[in-house]
Image (cartoon, rainbow, N blue to C red):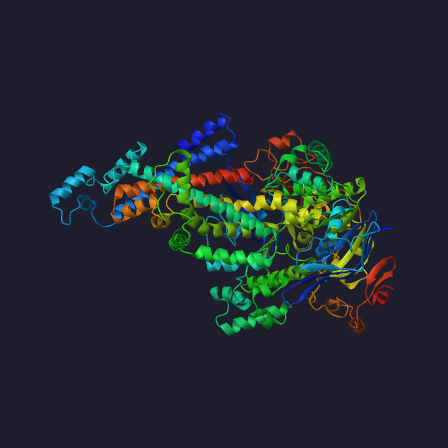
Amino acid sequence: MPLLQMKNVDINYRMKKNEVKAVRDFTLDINERDIVGIIGESGSGKSTLAHGLMRILPRNGYMKASEIKLNNKDILNISDEEFRELRWIEMSIVFQKAMSALSPVHKIFDQMYDTILAHKPQVSRNEAEEKLSKLLEIVNLPKKTLNMYPHELSGGMMQRVMISLGLIFNPKLVILDEVTTALDVITQGQLLDEIKRLVNEFKLTVMMITHDVGVVNEVCTKIAILYAGELLEYGNVKDIIFEPFNPYTQALVESHPDLNPEGSTLKGIPGILPDLINPPESCIFYDRCKYRKDICKNGKPELQDYKGRKVKCFRVGELHG
Amino acid sequence: MYRLSFLCSFLEVKGLSSLGRFIIRRTLSIIPMVLLIVAINFFIIHLAPGNPAQLISGLEQPSPEVIEALEEQYGLNQPLIVQLGLYYRNIFQGNLGYSFIYGTSVNGLIFERAGATILLTVTAAIIAFIIGTLIAVWVGRRKTKVLDSIFSVLAYIFYAMPSFWLALVLILTFSSTFKLFPTSGMFNVRESYEGFAKIGDVLYHLALPCATLALIQIPVFFRVTRSSIDQVHQDEYITTFTAIGISRKKIFKKYVLKNAILPTITIFGLTLGYAISGAALVEIVFAWPGMGRLMLDAVFRRDYNLLLGIYFVMAVCICLAILITDIVYALVDPRIRY
Amino acid sequence: MDKNILEVKNLKKYFPVRKMGKKQYVKAVDDLNFSIREGEIFGVLGESGCGKSTLGRVINRLDFEQSGDITFLNNVISGKSYKSDKNFRKKMQMIFQNPYDSFDPKMLIYKSIELPMKINDVNSDAGSRINEIVETMNKAKLTPAESLLTRYPHELSGGQLQRISIIRSMLLKPKFIIADECVSMLDVSVRAGVLNLLLTFQEELNSAMLFITHDISVATYICNRIMVLYAGKIMEIAESKDILDNPLHPYTRALVSYSPIISKEEKKRFRITGEVVTPIDPPPGCRFASRCPMAKDICKKEEPILKEIGKNRKAACHFV
């Protein structure tokens, strides 16, 4: 039974004269206990997708979908108040910029306590303090952190605070939105270790949004490749990183210096992102694809099940038969 | 400065809280600042052409003997730097000198009028602060474009209005036409009220000049708070709290407000700083017995001592206002290091 | 090939800070000794605050050292400001992290490229300058060159603009290039283009390069040798393959093991704790001692010297 079911999700941003179609026809089921890395470069719509799911899109953004279910419960067609009640209880999110993710002029305890009060108004200060110090201990932060202000902590410590904040109600689904991007290499590694441990301890299902294939390789079990707002490939991490089927995935992976055969020139992806205001009717990667043929111009390829993964490419059977 | 830091380290040993140390350090730093301002004023005033002895004498063509005698009497024949030294000594003794034109001590003149001015300007600033901020908060919570536009336009109109003109309009409307408030003065000179009646009388006279000043300052507070609220709404922690599911009401009341009020505090402090001098025109229109008239007289009739005295008081007021602002800011914003 | 183009001796750069009224120093770059050979790509690897960017700025004379000697092309350049020395600027060029900040937003790309050529007398007439710019753009596969050149910086993508900033530097035919985190802002798929362009030009001009980065994968791809910095000190200098496959210094081992390097084998962490410390008046001993799992008493008392430990290999650790 999948924990999160998304069907035909579209997310658009209204601009002055037109609309940017940031996420298009995104369909994916995330199973319980999966750690899914959503990989994409800038403009892929990966953060938009996360914000859409959490209903925190900017005012000019809106989402359409035929179905979004969390834990088999419809979360698409419910009111804002109904959705508010399941926020943080059923799913939480941790953002990239930890340093500015909490109010700078309030103590960390106040902000964490308000989080508890938002859903359990009967919890007393003392109970909250006890619970929160335990929670901080789990992410290896001292109890006194509660009485500090955000600016008194380092980036890595603040990110631990934000992760513990996300775990307050022990939600099933946690979205990690580029949580290690701003951190130094060693701090990032330490935090990733921590995340791996927490995922087991709290039996979490994780949607990890990142641009770094290396990070996904360290913690995730599944990987979803997003390009210009479309899902191009989905499957087990190792399968996809070491034997990509979709041409974009292949090009992306080959751009990574670690996966580049020694002594050979690193390959990038020439060209630029397609126009997202009027996305092409063809395969979205057509312009930059080195395997393109005339058939790729005719309409959009379906996301098809192929050899234990999902791939969107007209020529996948031919190229990886 | 070395002495100062020595004093600070001494205080550290005494185990004062860091905020206490901050306040003392900042207060002490005012002294050299004010002295420097006094020196600059002193030299600038003496740069101006014209001979004060001539003015004091009251004659068109005073004889050189008269001038000499007067210069001797007021110490005007000494080198400037000696005059400045004498002036400093007088300040430390609490003596701002003798006014040539009023023929009385500057201390007394300023003391007599400062109260009236401070009453007027501080009341106006507080009212403007409260009303301006409240309107901004009220408009900021309702994200309706119409309301926002109406108040923005109003703010522009009042901000651009000359104060004396607004004063006249208010007098015409509320005094001449509706006879609700007196046209001028601070007391009803025909009656001699005591106690609460006196307070009531002053407040009654205060209403119009105070309203004039407040109406012009409200737009400043409104605009600053308004844009500050908008800015805070775009901050990332607001997204965090929305994602958490904290109600919009609570997010606004607890988090948006406290973050948005910070720049307003600075503006309020600056407004207070100019309280002693900023209302001259309005005071003159309403014949309010404050510093405005005094300053004007001092400027036109080149009363050095009076002018220097007024500038000295102004400098102290501005420094104090900035000090208070800094302290309040430090109390509200934990990011400020002291 | 074995001639040194740049030699750095006992280079120090301290920044004063005031803490509780007392004057202290951040020892951002503390007593560095290294040299770069002609035609070599020399990597400086480290985390934020290790002093890598300061080092680049001091060598490029954008900042000035506390003490120490820098010799460039057999001339001592330390102690001088070179504010308007065209000859020096022409020989040593710098490429910055954010290309949008290194172009005048109100100037056409073409003007931005031409200006340094004009100042440095590369090609005397405008016509031949244009020809050379267009030619170089075409060679770098930035096409159509004419259309790109008549745009403003904000109309180009980060990758395009960074490649243009490389072209702008290379048209001066510098002997030495300092690239400060020049791909860290860019998407992976765009990085390759920028790195390869750097390599192409570097090879063509046979210039040397100081490549500053925090990314070990990028560093090993592009660099011949890598110097690892931590809190203003050199931890290790070695050929890049050795750094990646066989790091010796405990800090380098930690750095490599914590880097998200993709490989089929499971890798083990060389576990360390704590966070990077700013070197404000640091205590004696090894800078890394407080976090090092191998640290003994001596590490906190005595500072390890950077010693030769094999061919082309140096490390500063008591236990290597």
Left or right: where does residue B137 sit relative to residue B86? Answer: right
Up the image or down, B336 lies above or below A256; here it is above
**Residue C228 pos. (x, y %):** 63, 45
Residue A124 visible at all: yes
Res. C165 image quadrant:
bottom right
Q: Quadrant of residue C84?
A: bottom left
Q: Quadrant of residue A191?
A: top right
Viewer-nearest residue: C266 or B16: B16
Q: Is residue B275 left or right of residue C202?
A: left
Q: Which of the pair B192/A226 is nearer the observer?
A: B192
- Note whether C300 is above or below C92 in the view shown: above
User: How many marks on residues?
Assistant: 0
Q: Nearer the viewer, residue C50 or B82?
A: B82
Rendered-image quadrant of the C terminus of chain A = bottom right
Q: Is residue C68 visible?
A: no
Residue B143 point in image, percent of width and height: 61, 55
> Residue sitting at 30 percent across and 44 percent down?
B294
Residue at the spot 76% in from the left edge and 70% down from the top edge: A281
Image side of residue C306 versus residue B299, left or right: right
Q: Position of residue A121 (x, y in %)?
A: 72, 39
Residue C253 or residue C162, whichever sits in front: C162
Q: Position of residue A296 (x, y in %)?
A: 79, 71
